[in-house]
Image (cartoon, helix red, strand yellow):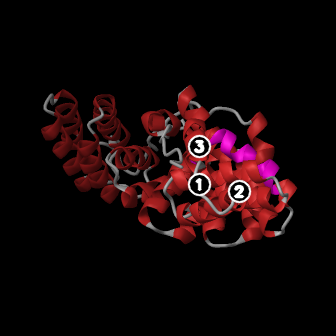
Amino acid sequence: MASQKVSYISKTLLSILFIAGMLIAPVKVWAQEPTEEEYKSLTDIQAEKDVTKKADMIFSFLKEKPKTAYRPNVVAEYQKIMDQFGDEKNWNRIVALGERFIDIAPNDDFTERYLTAAYSATNNNKGFVTYAEKAYASKPSTALAVEIAKAYKKLGNDAKYMQWREKILASDPENIEILVDMVQRYQASNNTAQALKYAKLCLQALPTAKKPEGLDAQAWKNMTDAGYAVAYGVIGANAYQSQNYAVAITNLNNAIRYYKNMDQAYYLLGVSYWQKNQLEPAMLNFAKAYLLKGSYAAGAKKYLDQLWASGHRGSLAGVERVIERARQDLK
């Protein structure tokens, strides 16, 4: 089952990082009175139209005159350039300019937020998490936490990914994307208790979960369908392992309502119906597992043939009718 990987925040990351009231105005430093030379440098910077030359002039001025009274004015000129590049989505120039400014003014909030957006847009996950964590520390946001978690996942840093998933669920316990991922990861590691825990949380959250801003309706439906399928599948498989076949049948049938190509569910349904002595649905589900050609196909075909032959004097003649019906159901 293809899980939803839609990055619905990336298009609006700048707006999340720069919402009203979050821009930090340059701090005025009046350590010394401005000189005529400094005033001329400021007016030259303000008059320069070439952004590359202007940027060079800004950095030279700030390095040479770190305590100038005109620092806020010069920083404002730098911010105008960054805003221009932001409007143009010129992410590479934002990175180049921002990294130069961070060398002069470490921990500059304005620059860190632009670098966060730029590294996200250029798929530089290492650069992104470096600045995104700082942006989150100054103004926590669930949407930003989701992107940080995704970046750590892409970097293969499971410890940090787990840390950020927990942050997300602490502030947004109905985050379906994260809940589904938790279920799948714990299931894959055979941690049944945790997989069941998050499967149940997922089913509790789904009926009232709200579509994230920026995610289209079809992508949201795909995500919620995946949530239902994964959660019901885990609960059904656990009931099967406990030989609670009636509960297994109910939950596994719910799972395939939302994702009909779940070969494991069909195989477990086949065995569960067989245990309940309901042979026709058992064969039909084995046929579906066989047709999906996954890891359960060989076992499903073996049991399908065995059940059919047991009711037809050892002959497999006619078993193709069951397979054809299964094929039609899977369409």
Q: Is residue 250 magenta?
A: yes
**Quarter of the rendering occupied by the C terminus:** top right
Residue 282 lies within the magenta run: no
Q: Earlier in the sequence, mark 2 or mark 1?
A: 2
**Residue at 31% of width from left, 37% of height from top?**
82
Q: Is residue 164 above or below residue 158?
A: above
Numbered mark located on residue 175 in the image: none
Part of the protein shown in magenta: 248-262
> What amino acid is at disc 2?
Gly
Mark 2: few/some/many CA within 10 Å (<14, 14-19, 20+): many
Q: CA distance from mark 2 to mark 3?
A: 17 Å
Q: Position of residue 70 (x, y in %)?
A: 33, 40
* Residue 325, quarter of picture: top right
Main SS class of the magenta portion in the image? helix
Report the residue at 44% width, 41% height from top: 26
Location of residue 310 in the rendering, given as x and y in whole percent from the top left corner:
71, 62
Residue tagged 1? 289
Residue 161, given in percent of the width and then of the height, sits at 55, 63
Query: How many numbered discs sit on the rendered protein?
Result: 3
Q: Is residue 203 left or right of residue 107?
A: right
Taking the image as shown, residue 146 lies to the left or right of residue 276, namely left
Residue type at mark 1: give it.
Ala
Circle 1 residues within 10 Å: few <14, some 14–19, many ≥20: many
Point out residue 112 in the picture as x, y percentages from the top left corner.
42, 50
Q: Is residue 198 visible?
A: no
> Which residue position is annotated with label 3?
321
